[in-house]
Amino acid sequence: MVLAQMLLAACFGAAGVLAPVVAPALGYTTAALGPYAGVFGVAVLAGGTLIDGVLRRHGGARTLQISALVSAAGVLLAASASLPLVGLSSIVLGFGGGMTVPAAIHVLAHVTPPERLGIVFAVNQCGVPAGFGLAGVVFPLLLRVTDWRMSLVLLAAALVLIILIIQPMRAALDAGRDPRARLGGKAFAEPLRMAWNEPRLRLLGWLTFSLITVQMAMQAYLVSYLHLGLGFTHLQAGAAFLVSQVAAVVTRLFLGWLLDKVGRYVFVLGILGLGSGLSALWLCAVDPDWSYAALLAVSAVTGGFMSGWNAVYFAAVSRAAPPGRAGTAVGGTQIFTSVGAIVGPLIVSAVLSASGSYAAGFSVVSVFAVVIGLRLLWMERQTSRPARVSP
């Protein structure tokens, strides 16, 4: 599951890391990454909406294989260097990516004791920042020995390999599937219905909308900001991106272990939301004259807050979901995630086009995380306040 998450995360990470090279080759600036990421987010929304019927009929392992195959096709479309096919790749990649997390959560929720959900989901979700981080270093290194198109072909080959690795485990992991389950009809709307009608899931949906807005903006534009905006080399910028994702891995593992022992998901998610917004503002203060060590420190703090919340969120969703429906609940709240993933990069793209400033775009999206962070901390304070006893 971790390896699958790594490779599938690298698919979108490739867009942000390769943008300084690919965009000029296609006749565009890196501001075009915003619309590309926006279309990607819409396609993720479609993939998440369809997930309930697919999981019931085919099981989580087969759904993950389908996701990897579709994503490999999307990567090859991007490698064509044809502008229409590159545009189409955002749709195909997003659709495949929309099935990835619900499929993995569906599998793990069936084989994990409830008291171990935090650490297991944390380990699994480490694959996402690891995939983004490795993309930040691997692709600039590959560009020294080959071109960006062959780099994408190699990524597609790795995705096909993950399909083969999963196959021997498929029968055991998907033993509870229902081959007669419907793919359409009520199954089509079930994830969104569940996420909207259950108050706890709805709150978690708004949470993920706010936090992913900041996270995706940073992941899409950090390399371009450091390389084109501040003048660091492409490899230095990619390495800083890697450091941010390593910090996210450490944060996820620590919080997964901690929350299995102490709980308090709402409080921790509030701290992460507030820290995410404030660290985005700190990132805006980076100056080209800063030492590279200072840049790496900012990148680590930024990555820890902006990308460290996901495992806590997935554990909270799994606890709030009806028994055996964790994958469907994740698919439903992922609809909120998809909208946030669209909004974040588009805001930065619009601000960048209007002002020429990456920092201004980061400042705008930071508001989303600060607001939800303060909202959750206030709610936690009200919940934990002892009731007054009348004399």
Image: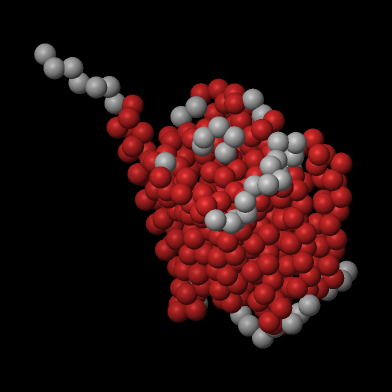
Q: Quadrant of residue 367?
A: bottom left
Q: What residue sits 87% from the left and 50% below the top?
A: 164
293 is higher (above) or lower (below) than 262: below
Q: Quadrant of residue 323?
A: top right
* Residue 298: percent from left, percent from top: 57, 52
Identity of the residue furthest to the top in this view: 391
Direction from residue 45 to residue 60 in the image, left or right: right
Q: What residue sits 42% from the left and 63% below the top?
A: 364
Total labels drawn: 0
* Residue 34: percent from left, percent from top: 55, 71
Does residue 106 appear in the picture of this structure? yes
Does residue 134 appear in the picture of this structure? no
In front of the other: 127 or 191: 191
Identity of the residue furthest to the bottom in this view: 27
Identity of the residue furthest to the left in this view: 391
Q: Quadrant of residue 33?
A: bottom right
375 is higher (above) or lower (below) than 322: below
In front of the other: 243 or 296: 243
The quadrant of the picture occupied by the C terminus is: top left
Direction from residue 344 to residue 138 in the image, left or right: right
Q: What residue sits 69% from the left and 71% below the top?
A: 89
The quadrant of the picture occupied by the N terminus is: top right
